[in-house]
Image (spheres, rainbow, N blue to C red):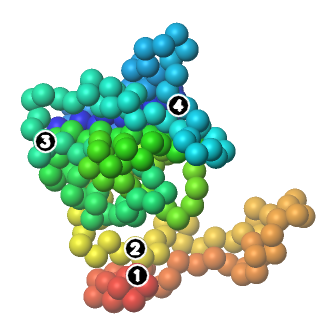
Amino acid sequence: MIRFDIITIFPEIFDSYFNESIIKRAQKRKLVKINIHNLRDSATDRHHTVDSRPYSGGAGMILKADIILKAVKKIINRKINNKGRRIILFSAKGKPFNQNKARELAKKYEQVILICGRYEGVDERVAKYIADEEISIGEYVLTGGEIPAMVVVDAVSRLIPGVIKNESLKEESFTLEDKEYPQYTRPEILEPGKYLKNCKFCPPKFRKVKFWKVPKVLLSGNHKDIDDWKKKNS
């Protein structure tokens, strides 16, 4: 079992996503454990303050290193040694998250602590002294680390043995090439005009081709030709 501990100031954000579909079943079967921790619970003042103004001035507020340190200290599992634990801070300057990193987390660690930033950022001492690494899920700016945390939990969880039963999906999760190819399902021939009679403002692209057909090779039953087509279109 892998344990995720997520530190955030908006714990309710995760309720809906983690209580549906594969992630919900994985938790129920005790293959994955997800704990959400409210950073404000580690603040001791009356207002549960977790941020402060940056030194030297600047816009916005910065999450405090001392509060994050307290939060991390509380949730470190003593039964897991340091080699089995990974502390991750989500940051725009972090290393890009990819499938190889997901495999590494799934294979090597029993506890993954995810620190979600907010506001203008996080005190740099969190990255320097607390986190093992900084991760980014893309070259764009988000309002916080909660969505990246969901991405990491989802990507890593599906690699845990037993989480996904379907063999084809399991193969997809562990493939070394990580290639995708176009996929189709019924109907074999789709006539979009039937659905667009009263759609005067639908994009012209919808009507550009009268019949949307499945490639003939996928209907041929010739496995070699199908495999060649998939490789060519990956």
Q: Secondary structure at mark 3?
A: helix
Q: Which mark is residue 113?
A: none
Mark yes or no: residue 150 visible.
no
- Residues under labels 3 and 1: Cα distance? 40 Å
State which quadrant residue 221 falls in: bottom left
Q: Quadrant of the N terminus?
A: top left
Q: Earlier in the sequence, mark 4 or mark 1?
A: 4
Q: Which mark is residue 51?
A: 4
Q: Is residue 56 left or right of residue 177?
A: right
Mark yes or no: residue 71 visible.
yes
Which is closer to the viewer, label 3 or label 2? 3
Residue located beneath label 2 in the image: 180
Percent of width and height locating residue 175: 24, 69
For mark 4, does the 10 Å Cα neighbourhood hold few (<14), some (14 to 19), or many (20 or more) residues?
many
**Residue flagged by tag 1: what amino acid is it?**
Ser
Instruction: Name the residue located 28 percent from the left edge and 60 percent from the top edge.
Output: 101
